[in-house]
Amino acid sequence: MKTVLIGLGNPIVSDDAVGIRAVEVLEKEHWEDVDVKIASVGGMELVEMMLDYSRAIVVDSILTGKNDVGTVIRITPEDFSESKNISNLHNVGFIQALKFWSSAGGSVPEHIVIYAMEVEDVSTFSETMTPGVESSLPELISRVRDELNGRNLFSSRLP
């Protein structure tokens, strides 16, 4: 199964870098049949990065205020209703983009998983993440590693 692992965020905006930082660590492990991409996109551009893969794993930050900082959440597209979208993936319309590409005959991955970490600060220009996010980074990496290895031990849920 050909997989794309996508780290999203902005490396110079404090906690927004968590997806990128996690994927950079995992990239060094040289996964077979896994392409690694880093981006600061959402919506159509994000889905375009997934086309022609059978599995996509996206790693990003999320700021809901409903979870403790550092909480890792596993989400699939099925977790969203028609009225919800993952606008925290940097743009409007991730779910709508998936539907568009599917209806247009695009080769959208059959399996899509988003690992998001509840963060504290996505507005400060800094290459340093907050302590709660930094200390939870190993857990995020471990969960994504398990997903890459085909071990899904974590239930999906929205905050």
Image (cartoon, grey):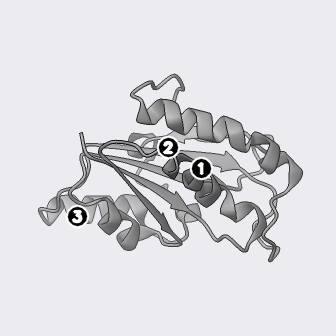
For disc 2, the marked residue is: 29
What mark, if any, has residue 101 been given in the picture? 3
Mark 2 lies on a secondary structure that is: loop
Residue occupying the far right of the picture:
131
> In this view of the protein, which residue sits in the foreground, 150 or 27?
27
C-alpha gap between disc 2 and disc 3:
31 Å
Asked if one can make out residue 67 in the rendered structure from this viewpoint, the answer is no
Query: Is 106 on the left or on the right of 82, as rendered?
Result: left
Query: Is disc 3 surrounded by few (<14), some (14 to 19) or many (20+) residues within 10 Å?
Result: some
C-alpha gap between disc 1 and disc 3:
30 Å
Residue 51 position by quadrant = bottom left
| Residue at 69% over, 64% down | 16
Q: Are marks 2 and 3 in contact (CB under 8 Å)?
A: no
Q: Are marks 2 and 1 in contact (CB under 8 Å)?
A: yes
User: Where's residue 30, x and y in %?
Assistant: 43, 46
Question: Which amino acid, by three-letter code, is at mark 2?
Answer: Glu
Q: Earlier in the sequence, mark 1 or mark 3?
A: 1
Query: Is 72 on the left or on the right of 29, as rendered?
Result: right
Mark 1 lies on a secondary structure that is: helix
Query: Is disc 2 surrounded by few (<14), some (14 to 19) or many (20+) residues within 10 Å?
Result: few
User: Where's residue 63, x and y in %?
Assistant: 71, 56
Residue 10 position by quadrant = bottom right
Mark 3 lies on a secondary structure that is: helix
User: Where's residue 144, x and y in %?
Assistant: 53, 38
What mark, if any, has residue 25 been given in the picture? 1
Compared to residue 44, the image places residue 1 above or below, namely: above
Query: Is 135 on the left or on the right of 29, as rendered?
Result: right
Compared to residue 116, the image places residue 95 above or below, namely: below
| Residue at 60% over, 48% down | 116
Question: Which amino acid, by three-letter code, is at mark 1?
Answer: Val
